[in-house]
Amino acid sequence: MAEPILRVDNLCCGFHTEDGYIRVVDGVSFECEAGKTLGLVGESGCGKTVSALAVMGLLPQPAGVVEEGRILFRGEDLASTSHETMRVVRGQKIGMIFQEPMTALNPVHRVGKQLFEALRLYGSGRDQDEPAVAGGAALGRRNRRGRRLYESRSEKDELTARAVEQLEQVGIPDPVRRLREYPHQLSGGMRQRVMIAMALAGQPDILIADEPTTALDVTVQAQILDLLRELQQARGMTMIFITHDLGVVAEFCDEVLVMYAGRIAERAPVGQLFKMPRHPYTRGLIESLPRMDTPSRTPLNTIEGVVPKLTEMPAGCRFSNRCAYADERCGREVPVLESCAQPGAVGEPRDPKRSGEAQAAEPRDPKRSGEAEAAEPRDLKRSGEGEAAEPRAVRHEVACHHWQRLAA
Amino acid sequence: MSAPLLETHESHTVSEHGQTPAPRANAPLLEVRNLTKFFPVRAGVFLRKVGDVHAVDDVSFTLDRGETLGLVGESGCGKSTVGKTILNLLRPTAGQVLFEGRDLGTLSHAEWRAMRRDIQIVFQDPMESLNARHTVGQILEEPFVIHKLGTPEARNVWARDLLERVGLPRSAVSRFPHEFSGGQRQRIGIARAIALRPKLIICDEAVSALDVSVRAQIINLLLELQRDMELALLFIAHDLAVVRHISNEVAVMYLGRIVERAPSRDIYERPSHPYTQALVSAIPLPDPDRDRDRIVLEGDVPSPISPPTGCRFHTRCTYALEVCEAKTPEWEPVSERQQVACHRWRELR
């Protein structure tokens, strides 16, 4: 396995509120493999968006706090880096698109102006040799000084040409006219395409898509998912896809993290997740979906109860108060992510090249989601793995005391 | 028909709370005939009418007691307008809505008031449809107050009964809507809708804003209430998988018109209209191993202000011929209960 492009280690973040500090994300760790799509799934309030915002350094200030944990992008810790570096990382290394393009786009500016801004900020492509920090400072100054969108006629023409190119790339017909229009004149699907064009203007290595199709109709959703897939393949982009829709996950992601109440419940390649969900929560989620191919008007399986309030979380497993398998230990002891892959199981059913050979899953460090110090030795081990570049084993992990009972 | 309805309304007492007159045996519970709703588009200094938004155009269907009809389509297709027009929250431009054989367009204000006991609605966002300054008890007692039913003590008991019925604690009467989660609020919305023991509930995207696990709970609740109360549901939503699960029959709308109507099983197994086929194929299935031929529609839905002539889907349909542009397709039966409005459905099977 190649060195992950992004690694998040034991991320804990939260918000200062009127009722005091509330931790929203509690010890989340994951890696993104270059060129792959990692899905972040969970219900509202489970911390999936907050994790992504923390990666982007976009937690609302001053309420939002990254308490501890590391966010390693190509080995550089974004959690402790300067604002200047983050300015470069955002957009040019990691881009992000949001659920509701109407709120993300500025309604009083034409599409063209907003796109020019992005294009100008990111310059004419990235200079790979330039160190990130210096580039950031330079860009920041230029941006603060120059209030005009362009200095000269020729620059305008150049920007227009590039903007048109960007819009064509995301499949917007008649891009010259669209540049002159305001966001409200575009349909929801078109707006999302504009958002994608803006996010890609800086040619990021990672694209974080936060519920990018949730506000769209299914047929438009299919268009946007196709577009994202094409762009990802053409650019070799890594994606983090945040959604609550398990259908979209199944069709779009390579690997999935299921989150519940700020913690990771299960991590699995997408095929494994749906075939053999190991966490009672994951299983409950999958079973509670109305499906197109099951008899209609039959009661659906449900997960009883509601997600507890962040201030009233059970001490042990946060799912314990809704779980049919829970016992006294679940209420007391926090389960850690442990490997539950079957020896010899092979991942990635979609990639026939890789599915040839199998490798037994490596037993994971049991302290994984526990303490920060667990990170160090694991780093070394991981980079050793990277050099070997062996066919992947299934990495299926679950944070549940009783997953074996479920598996049986 | 009007007399007994009004009579019961007036003679309503505590003991017979919820009793409504027997339906006329021959008429379907709800019949919508050629329902049309245009919204004027105005422009210029004098707000001259420059056109119409063809929100609902010549929509007809029937719904029997205790049955569920799913109305599915993408945003802007007019499905919510159908629901609001049935309830007379919007005046239809043309067409009729018959409830138990009675034309709702001819009712007086007072008659409508009585009629609303039988037809209720549940909206998508319970936070917006529940008064944030009222306690849950006040919210649930209000239907009884409006219809002058019961004593204050009795109403309070009924409100508690209703909460229990929808799976909330009886003590919730003294709390406010903001103290509840989204799913619990939708339960309150449903409790209010069933308070007067209606015969028909219009669910306008009632589960669309809910999380997966909560959505399943609410769907189960609706199915259970429907069975126990012989409720008819007009279930309006954009999510075909949800609609299919809860409905006996599904009607697919595109740009103001119904293009296909079929039992819920057939809508998935053998959709006949090219739009239905595209809609079904676009639903992401929670099954990563399944390879499907996805039909991805090009472009966007055309403007409802000047909808395409003939079949409204012809501008995006891969099978469109000249006839599709020239002539509005007639309803044709595919099977006994499945109907489609497409010139070419036979060739496409």
Image (cartoon, coloured by chain):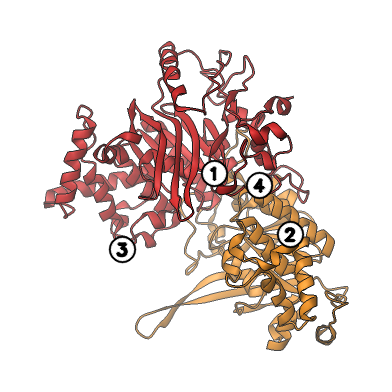
Which lettered chain is shown in red?
A
Q: Chain of mark 4?
A: B
Q: Are marks 3 and 2 on the same chain?
A: no
The three-letter code of the residue at mark 4 reads Ser
Mark 3, mark 1: which one is toward the viewer? 1
Residue A387 at x, y percent in the picture: 40, 12
Residue under numbered circle 1: A46
Check residue B213 in the rendering and tell me which mark sits there, or answer none. 4
**Element type at marker 4?**
helix
Mark 4, mark 2: which one is toward the viewer? 2
Q: Decide: few, some or many residues near mark 2? Use Cα within 10 Å; few <14, some 14-19, many ≥20.
A: few
Q: Residue furthest top?
A: A388
Residue under numbered circle 2: B169
Q: Disc 3, disc 1: CB below 8 Å?
A: no
Which lettered chain is shown in orange?
B
**Inter-mark Cα distance, 3 to 4:** 39 Å
The residue sitting at 70% across, 55% down in the picture is B218
Q: Earlier in the sequence, mark 3 or mark 1?
A: 1
Residue under numbered circle 3: A108
